[in-house]
Image (cartoon, coloured by chain):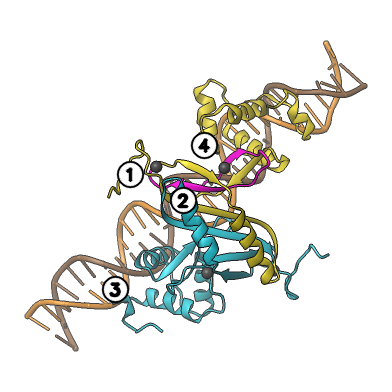
Chain colours: A yellow, B cyan, C orange, D brown
Amino acid sequence: MHQPDHLKTVGLKSTLPRLKVLSLFEASKQRHLSAEEVYKLLLTSGDDVGLATIYRVLTQFEQAGLLMRHHFEGGKSVFELNQGEHHDHIVCMQCGHVEEFYDATIEARQKIAATDRGFTIHDHSLYIYADCNKPKCPNKIQS
Amino acid sequence: MHQPDHLKTVGLKSTLPRLKVLSLFEASKQRHLSAEEVYKLLLTSGDDVGLATIYRVLTQFEQAGLLMRHHFEGGKSVFELNQGEHHDHIVCMQCGHVEEFYDATIEARQKIAATDRGFTIHDHSLYIYADCNKPKCPNKIQS
DNA sequence: TTGCAAATAAGAATGATTATCATTTGTGAC
DNA sequence: GTCACAAATGATAATCATTCTTATTTGCAA
Ligand SMILES: [Mn+2]
Ligand SMILES: [Mn+2]
Ligand SMILES: [Zn+2]
Ligand SMILES: [Zn+2]
């Protein structure tokens, strides 16, 4: 996946905290993680990293293009590995399960909506909030 | 627009602070306002309302269906009058100008994306971040 | 090895929002 | 109209995510 000195290629010193954070994203079961989750997961595995450092490193990785930041409802940022292809998100309001999707028609219509009004698009965010209806989901709203 | 006792019809006592906040949204030049903006605009017009009350009332109005809450980038909630018709937003990253749009195709494709994956949609948020390119916009990125 | 700029970590500070609680205010009953 | 009282308000403290500060540590190049 990433070379041990991959950090240098993006202009960041290859420090222990940074390597730990990056490895976590590469190994984690969950693709989308908040700063607090990264902090706790590293604590659990004995790889202590200060919370301030987590926040600093996540922001640096975002700026370096290694991670992407999202703002799901709930007031905290979540991050995921940036693997090039843009996608949007469906978030289960019951269990927090996240699924990704890409719809070329939606992307195209967004461009049209913006250019029709004279805007130049920089970015967009589309989140669908839903019930995942999975068997393991503690969905309170059963039909 | 709203009757003087409109608040009662949604189960809220018709108090002075609530009436002032509601009137502000009906009269304001800007359709989308943050709690802080509501607070300062009322201060300016001499209609002092405590900041805690502003936050409380905005949330109550949202729950009553009078206002809609949005989370544009920037970490603060913005509110607008709920006039029934759903729409999405284009936000200028330079001047903060907001324009609203509705695209039936986008709405339909979102439903499909969700149901294809077994989800039941509750809600969604779509924000396009862009440059408005208006003459009055202090747009640093000129071509 | 050494030197040192860059990075880390602990804790203080910040900004938005919510919780507390003593005081004030609608409103329905007389 | 006046009362009684639950509900609402507002000043302030608390919370939560995140950023800042600063003394100490560390990666890395000479
Ligand atoms: Mn994703
Ligand atoms: Mn709007
Ligand atoms: Zn679920
Ligand atoms: Zn603009």
> Where, by quadrant of the figure, is residue A132 drawn?
top left
The quarter of the picture where the N terminus of chain B appears is bottom left
What residue is shown with label 2? B114
Task: Please give left or right for residue D7 compared with residue B32 in the image.
Answer: left
Q: Position of residue B129 (x, y in %)?
A: 64, 60
Q: CA distance from mark 3 to mark 1?
A: 34 Å
Label 4 Cα crowd, 10 Å radius (few <14 / some 14-19 / many 20+): some
Q: Is residue A93 magenta?
A: yes
Instruction: Report the mark closest to the observer, 1 or 4.
Output: 1
Q: Amino acid at mark 4?
A: Glu
Instruction: Report the mark closest to the observer, 2 or 1.
Output: 2
Q: CA distance from mark 1 to mark 4?
A: 25 Å
Check the residue under mark 3 and report the chain it is in.
B
Question: Looking at the picture, does residue A16 appear above or below residue B43?
Answer: above
What residue is shown with label 1? A139
Residue A13 visible in the current orientation:
no
Q: Amino acid at mark 2?
A: Ala
Q: Amino acid at mark 1?
A: Asn
What residue is shown with label 4? A36
What residue is shown with label 3? B13
- Which residue occupies 47% across, 47% down? A91
Q: Are marks 4 and 3 in contact (CB under 8 Å)?
A: no
Q: Position of residue A61 (x, y in %)?
A: 68, 38
* SS assignment at label 1: loop
Q: Using the rendered image, report if marks 4 and 3 lie on a common chain.
A: no
* SS assignment at label 4: helix
Q: CA distance from mark 2 to mark 1?
A: 16 Å
Q: Is mark 1 within 8 Å of ligand 3?
A: yes
| Magenta stretch, residue numbers | A74-94
Q: Is mark 2 within 8 Å of ligand 3?
A: no
Q: Using the rendered image, report if marks 1 and 4 lie on a common chain.
A: yes
Q: Are marks 2 and 4 in contact (CB under 8 Å)?
A: no
